[in-house]
Image (cartoon, rainbow, N blue to C red):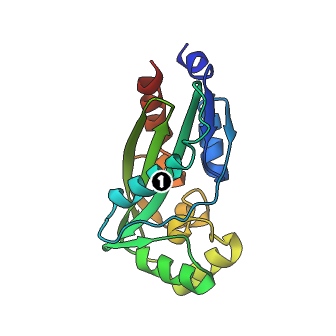
Amino acid sequence: MVIDELNRYNIILGSKSPRRQELLRGLGLEFKVVTKDWEEEYPSGLTGAEIALHVAGEKAKSFMDGLKDNDIVITADTIVWCVDEVLHKPAGREDAIRIIRKISGRTHEVITGVCLLSCVKSVSFHCSTKVTFAELSDEEIVYYISKYKPYDKAGAYGIQEWIGIAACSAINGSYFNVVGLPVEQVYRELKKFVL
């Protein structure tokens, strides 16, 4: 069984995101979480998937020292790309309101860059999902932010929360990518990585 084969490795998830941890657990993988302090910075001039791939790759590099033969590190970075702008995690309440106003009534792109790293190789890939939101009133936006406090989420929202249920009118691509990790693609790439 492929899962048994993968679980022979010491899989390290370099993310403190509870959503990523839950999704990876859902695959049946055994892993440990190791987090480091990263500056999620990238060179100006990068756009969309280039940003997510660059940051995921930089996170992976921070694990290179001390990797053992049996280790596989998984790092990821998710961005929301809307009208040629990266919508990061909001800096506070007013920023969250601004971000959700920007995606309200529009289609935006959720892009996750992923890096798999071992002692001998690394593989990077990305997943992109188009998400369309219906128009939200200021009252609805303030309700969502006050109740769910989405300050730890790129794009200032969680698709699995009220806003996704009430306002998401279309998803084109991986739903789990929007939650935080394109687990189906991660599983496929892990199989290729070790088998």
Q: Quadrant of residue 63?
A: top right
Q: Mark 1 belongs to which amino acid?
A: Glu
3 over 11 or under it: above or below = above
Residue situated in front as seen by the camera: 133 or 11: 11
Residue carrying label 1: 58
Q: Is residue 125 visible?
A: yes
Q: Residues within 10 Å of mark 1 (few under 14, many from 20)?
A: some
x, y (%) of residue 160?
A: 58, 56
Residue situated in front as seen by the camera: 27 or 175: 27
Give me the residue at 51% from left, 31% from top.
119
Relative to residue 51, is residue 116 drawn left or right?
right
Give me the residue at 67% from left, 45% from top.
34
Residue situated in front as seen by the camera: 110 or 40: 40
Q: Quadrant of residue 64?
A: top right
Relative to residue 82, is residue 1 drawn left or right?
right
Disc 1 is placed on an element classified as helix
Give me the residue at 53% from left, 62% from top.
164
| Image quarter in which the N terminus is found | top right
x, y (%) of residue 38?
A: 58, 60
Q: Is residue 111 visible?
A: no
x, y (%) of residue 23?
A: 60, 41
Give me the residue at 59% from left, 79% from top.
91
Please, which residue is most extreme toward the top here? Answer: 1
x, y (%) of residue 111?
A: 40, 56
| Image quarter in which the C terminus is found | top left
The mark total stands at: 1
133 over 110 or under it: above or below = below
